[in-house]
């Protein structure tokens, strides 16, 4: 019996999804366009980074080869020596390009239904929903009621929120209702209470997540979101890899927002951290804690939240390089027979129009002591990742994918 470590680099897509046009994303290519921008000098930022994209450890595992296979062309600065791990790319079959769909499919359960979305209008929420939330949560009203950037709407409405006690409610192109409130003036537990009520109210609308977005600060100039975000998600429609592992008596150690994404089902322990560097520390601690047959499942969210949605090419490139520099620390603590899979849940091309996720293929990099190397090619569902992990851990197979390591 061995261990498995599953890592999602949130939004690190590698382009070329065949159905991208149906999502308005034809031509999106997160990693490819970042690499091209860096090679052309558009990824430079004084004091942060400069020059071509440098990801030697990920490239050694096959990232450049997987991206070239997906997009049909090499990436500047990537695709050097023959990969030392198993490499390929995944094709999403779920109907969305959102976080829950990607993660659930990675865990062996594609999403068979279409999510509900709020219209890009002002107001955006149905009056009946707003009225019910105000009544049941005993609120003086709400602010926002529109599509917005989370940081921008806090700067715009944060002071009014503190003055009136009305929470800031907004959405995006995702299937989501986000509620922002000041941790001290409104109260963190009070915010969580309001979000729990909102979760129940949006269930009939098939909204994927309600997200608590707490912030601190004395005024618009210094309002800042805190790490105490909490997601209230619809649970997956059937047992996932995580449920199967727990049912078999294994630990599932969730790092980052994994617990929230899976509605805390199939989770033994949750560890969160304020940024991706601290998340890597938490990942290493979880790997140290994991016993034989256990699963460590981690999400690195900064790529998506801080750089993809904000269309920040230098920031995204620097974050990728920072993750790459720490990979040898993970390799150093692996035991014989351990399996590590690095993948993504969707794209978020920082060179693309808008601020939404982008429908893309995702990389699949698998490695571990004694596991060999080779091309796994195109995988027609992300669920192949979950089934590979299940097979590696000796768990019963699921219904939707096949292992690529046999």
Image: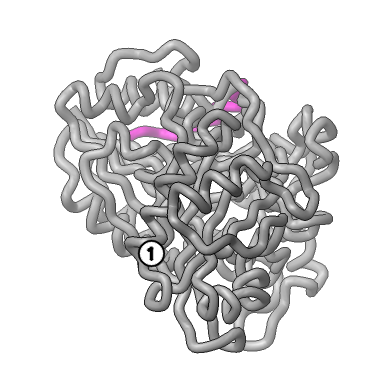
Taking depth in this image into account, of 59 and 191 the one nearest to the observer is: 191
Please report the bounds of the magenta region as a residue range. Answer: 370-380
What is the number of callouts on the image? 1
Q: Is residue 371 magenta?
A: yes
Tell me the colour scheme of the image.
Answer: one colour
Image location of residue 36, percent across then percent down: 78, 60
Relative image position of residue 332 (x, y in whole percent): 28, 56
Where on the picture, by quarter, is residue 223? bottom right
From this view, report whether residue 107 is shown above or below residue 31. Answer: above
Residue at horizontal 24 percent and vertical 52 percent from the top: 286
Residue 44 as seen in the image, left or right of residue 342: right
Is 170 left, or right, of 253 in this rendering? Answer: right
Evaluate whether residue 212 shows in this view: yes
Q: Nearer the viewer, residue 142 or 179?
A: 142
Residue visible at 46% across and 34% down?
A: 234
Q: Can residue 59 be seen from the camera position used here? A: no
Within 10 Å of the Cα at label 1, are there few (<14), some (14-19), or many (20+) other Cα atoms? some
Q: Which residue is mark 1?
A: 228
Q: Hey, which quadrant is residue 62 in on the image?
A: top right
Please give left or right for residue 161 compared with residue 145 in the image: left
Magenta-colored stretch includes residue 314: no
**Left or right placement of residue 214 versus residue 145 in this view:** left
Q: Position of residue 109 (x, y in %)?
A: 47, 22
From the viewer's perspective, is residue 12 above or below residue 17? below
Dot 1: what SS?
Answer: loop
Query: In which quadrant is the C terminus drawn?
Result: top left
Residue projecting furthest to the top: 399
Residue under the point 83% across and 55% down: 353
Which of the pair 279/171 is nearer the observer? 171
For the point 78% across and 28% down, which residue is it? 18
Q: Position of residue 101 (x, y in %)?
A: 55, 33
User: Which image quarter is the N terminus in?
Assistant: top left
């Amino acid at each position: 019996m061995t261990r498995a470590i599953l890592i999602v680099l949130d939004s690190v897509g590698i382009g070329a999804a065949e159905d991208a046009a149906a999502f308005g994303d034809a031509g999106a290519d997160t990693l490819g366009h970042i690499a091209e921008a860096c090679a052309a000098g558009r990824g430079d930022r004084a004091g942060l980074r400069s020059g071509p994209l440098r990801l030697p450890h990920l490239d050694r595992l096959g990232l450049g080869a997987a991206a070239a296979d997906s997009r049909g062309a090499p990436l500047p600065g990537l695709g050097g020596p023959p990969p030392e791990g198993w490499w390929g790319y995944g094709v999403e079959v779920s109907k969305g390009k959102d976080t829950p769909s990607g993660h659930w499919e990675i865990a062996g359960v594609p999403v068979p239904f279409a999510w509900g979305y709020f219209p890009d209008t002002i107001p955006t929420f149905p009056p009946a929903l707003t009225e019910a939330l105000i009544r049941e949560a005993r609120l003086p009203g709400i602010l926002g009621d529109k599509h917005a950037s989370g940081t921008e709407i806090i700067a715009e409405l944060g002071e009014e929120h503190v003055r009136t006690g009305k929470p800031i409610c907004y959405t995006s192109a995702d299937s989501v209702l986000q509620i922002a409130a000041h941790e001290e003036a409104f109260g963190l537990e009070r915010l969580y209470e309001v979000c729990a009520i909102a979760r129940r109210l949006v269930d009939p609308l098939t909204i994927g997540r309600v997200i608590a977005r707490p912030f601190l600060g004395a005024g618009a100039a210094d309002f800042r979101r805190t790490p105490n975000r909490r997601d209230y998600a619809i649970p997956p429609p059937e047992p996932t890899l995580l449920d199967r592992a727990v049912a078999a008596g294994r630990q599932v150690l969730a790092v980052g927002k994994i617990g929230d994404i899976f509605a805390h089902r199939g989770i033994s322990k949750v560890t969160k951290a304020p940024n991706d560097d601290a998340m890597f520390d938490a990942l290493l601690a979880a790997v140290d804690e994991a016993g034989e047959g256990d699963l460590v499942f981690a999400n690195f969210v900064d790529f998506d939240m801080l750089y993809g949605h904000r269309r920040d090419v230098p920031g995204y490139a620097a974050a990728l390089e920072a993750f790459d520099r720490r990979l040898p620390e993970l390799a150093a603590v692996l035991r014989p027979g351990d399996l590590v899979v690095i993948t993504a849940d969707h794209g978020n091309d920082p060179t693309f129009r808008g601020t939404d996720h982008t429908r893309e293929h995702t990389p699949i990099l698998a490695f571990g002591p004694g596991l060999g190397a080779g091309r796994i090619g195109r995988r027609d569902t992300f669920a192949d990742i979950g089934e590979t992990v299940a097979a590696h851990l000796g768990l019963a197979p699921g219904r939707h994918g096949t292992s690529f390591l046999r």
